[in-house]
Image (cartoon, rainbow, N blue to C red):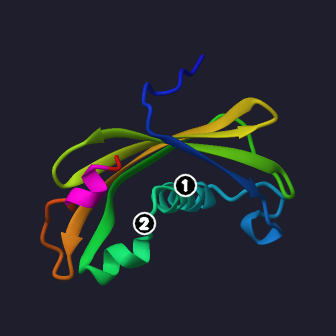
Amino acid sequence: MHQSPVSSHSHEITIRVRYQETDGQRRVHHGNYLTYFEMGRTEMLRARGYTYKAFEDAGLFMVVAEASCRYQAAAEYDDMLLLRTYVGKVTSASIRHTYELIRDSRIIATGETLVVCVDSEGKIKKLPDWLLSKT
């Protein structure tokens, strides 16, 4: 049985599966799970009082260096899903997130990403202090 990461830094959003996110069998195409994870990261940042747009306006970008997803059951068209996003390990220039995608109290997918802070030239940069204080 999967256990949630131990972290006081988590966020939840709900996602209704749209038709265009599905394949010919009305199941969510596997690539869309990573889009859901990005939504979780973005909304977690927004809930803490910041936007990714403001981050980019400061000349910084968060690039995905690693991504994984484990599928345990299919999500289908019109399902209402709960996505839990957790902050895992934070370094001076990166953040690891973990995810649980849930339908009807059952975890249907889990995932992990590592995002790295870079400047407009792709050089690794230190995360801003305002972000480190929020993670």
Picture coordinates of residue 15, whole percent (x, y): 73, 56
Q: Where is residue 34 drawn, in percent x and y?
A: 53, 57
On residue 109, which mark appears? none
Q: Is residue 10 above or below residue 45?
A: above
Q: Dots 1 and 2: beta carbons under 8 Å?
A: no
Q: Front-most of 61 and 43?
A: 43
Residue 87 image offset from top left, x and y in percent? 40, 41
Above or below, comparing residue 45 to residue 68 in the picture: below
Mark 2 sits on what residue? Answer: 50
Specify whether 125 is left or right of 98.
Answer: left
Q: Which element is circle 1 on?
A: helix
Range shown magenta: 129-133
In the foreground, 106 or 61 = 61
Which quadrant of the rendered structure holds the N terminus? top right
* Residue at 44 percent of width and 39 percent of height: 9
Residue at 37% of width from left, 77% of height from top? Answer: 54
